[in-house]
Amino acid sequence: MKRWVLPTLLIAVLIGAWQIAASTGAIADALNLDPILVPSPAEIAESLWQNRALLLEDAWVTLREMLFGLGFAVLFGLAFAVAMHLSETLRIAFYPLIVTSQTIPVIAIAPILVVWFGFGIGPKLWVIALICFFPITVNTLAGLRSVDPEAKKMKRTLDASRGQILWRVEAPASLPQLFSGVRIAVAIAAIAAVFAEWVGADSGLGHLILISQSQLQTARVFATVVVLSGIAIALFWSVALAERRLAWWGREGRG
């Protein structure tokens, strides 16, 4: 009960305080802003309903970008993690480059991707995949390398091949770490999608945020953020549910 009641009560208190402060103009006065720029939760809820068709249409665009981008990140992240685990040479060569790649802000090279691939879905998938690639790769590699050596030794005494050890021992043992990386990637995929749409797009929730800001429709901006947050939370809990089904021993190990 504490897992659900306490957060729910805290959110209710914060929303209530926000509603009172916005309705009385306290926030606008404190920030020296026009009250129209500080919508209340009630106004945001009204905007959610009035713009539901537009929000759903753009939400589907952003959700599709996130799913495909995450799919590419998982695919290439697993491939790189397994390759570096099996080959020390590849690990020594590529791991520092993968770490160094995180020092380069992807949003800075996003305009170049738009120039190369146009304003379609391609550049957005690249941005999301590049941002989500790192946690998946690093966590999976850590999981593969954390397998009990005695378990691998026992398999070798049973004449198991390297591929069999990978498939039957190392892969299952690394699943909890893989899911941890995917959960992190899901949490940042929404941010990556918004950045990608800000660079160049004619649809999507990120594009809708820009349009709403230019029109000073702050209630619709907040409504769009609510929808975006809902998508990220739904994907996060979907991954958590899959982890519970496929890697339940990892959750028990974490208590």
Image (cartoon, helix red, strand yellow):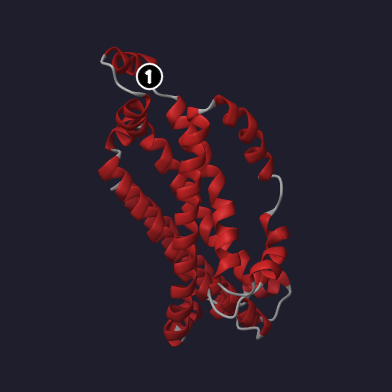
Residue 247 visible in rendering: yes
| Secondary structure beneath label 1 | loop
Q: Residue at x 36, y 54 (%)?
A: 237
Could you say which is closer to the camera, residue 230 or residue 24?
230
Mark 1 crowd level (few <14, some 14–19, many ≥20, 10 Å Cα): few
Give residue 101's quadrant in the image.
top right
- Determine which residue is flagged by label 1: 148
On the rendered structure, is 230 left or right of 96?
A: left
Above/below status of 217 relative to 245: below
- Residue 241 locus on image (x, y percent): 30, 50
Above/below status of 213 relative to 6: below
- Residue 104 locus on image (x, y percent): 71, 49
Above/below status of 53 relative to 233: below
On the rendered structure, is 165 left or right of 105?
A: left
Give residue 163's quadrant in the image.
top left
- Residue 45 locus on image (x, y percent): 45, 78
Residue 16 visible in rendering: no
Could you say which is closer to the camera, residue 159 or residue 250?
159
Q: Residue at x 56, y 44 (%)?
A: 134
Q: Residue at x 62, y 28 (%)?
A: 92
Could you say which is closer to the camera, residue 81 or residue 136?
81
Kindly identify the amino acid type of the residue bearing the numbered disc 1: Asp
- Residue 194 locus on image (x, y percent): 58, 66
Could you say which is closer to the camera, residue 95 or residue 40?
95
Quarter of the image where the C terminus is located = top left
Q: Residue at x 37, y 37 (%)?
A: 175
